[in-house]
Image: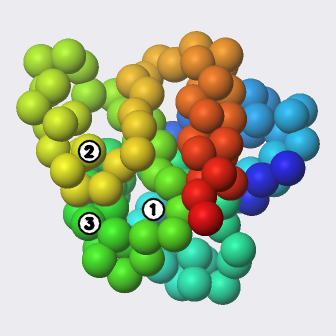
Amino acid sequence: MAKILIVDNDELQIRLVRLSLEPAGHIVDALQDSEHVVEVIAHQNLDLLILNCDLPKESGVDLLRELRARITKFPVLVLTGWASQRDADLVDLARDGADDYLTKPHDPIDLQIKVESLLKKTSARP
């Protein structure tokens, strides 16, 4: 069981992530913008962050950079609507601290596989 935070401004996307991950026993909290993410993360024992790139107020990419400058202890899975023509942006996400990404619309099984893989890698770290 893992504590997962999804930051996405799309309510349907949040519901889909919850439907994919909660049956496996994970606790999924959600925020719809970047405003309180740093505060929430500072006060929770988070195992994984799922982050949308296109957020109101502050982009998910900028938020990712800010989080990695402050906090590096948990994996970040970027869930993005960016199409393949923005592959260079996806490479930049890896440089900026994303551990993996999944494009929207996503397959629930692909999400489960990526989440379990990231959690397993994190638990194997010394």
Amino acid on which the number 2 mark rests in the picture: Ala
- Whether 25 is drawn above or below 66: the answer is above
Where is residue 83, by image quadrant?
top left
Q: Which residue is identified by label 2?
A: 94
Q: Earlier in the sequence, mark 3 or mark 1?
A: 1
Name the residue: 59% across, 45% down.
121
**Height in image: 82 above or below 72?**
above
Q: Nearer the viewer, residue 98 or 104?
A: 98
Horizontally, is 98 left or right of 48 in the view?
left
Q: Are marks 2 and 1 in contact (CB under 8 Å)?
A: no
Residue 58, numbered circle: none
* Residue drawn at (26%, 66%) of the image: 65
Q: Residues within 10 Å of mark 3 (few under 14, many from 20)?
A: some
**Residue 5 left/right relative to 58:** right
| Nearer the observer, 5 or 116 | 116
**Could you tell whether 39 is left or right of 61 in the image?**
right
Residue at 40% from the left image edge and 45% from the top image edge: 99
Give how far apart the Cα atoms at labels 3 and 2 are.
11 Å
Which element carries disc 2, helix, strand or loop?
helix
Q: Position of residue 77 (x, y in %)?
A: 47, 43
Q: Quadrant of residue 85?
A: top left
Q: Which residue is mark 1?
A: 33
Name the residue tied to disc 3: 65
Of the residues tagged 3 and 2, which is closer to the observer? 2
Is any atom of residue 43 visible in this view?
yes
For the residues labelled 3 and 1, the Cα–Cα distance comes to 15 Å
Q: Amino acid at mark 3?
A: Arg
Q: Position of residue 60 (x, y in %)?
A: 32, 55
Q: Hey, what amino acid is under mark 1? A: Asp
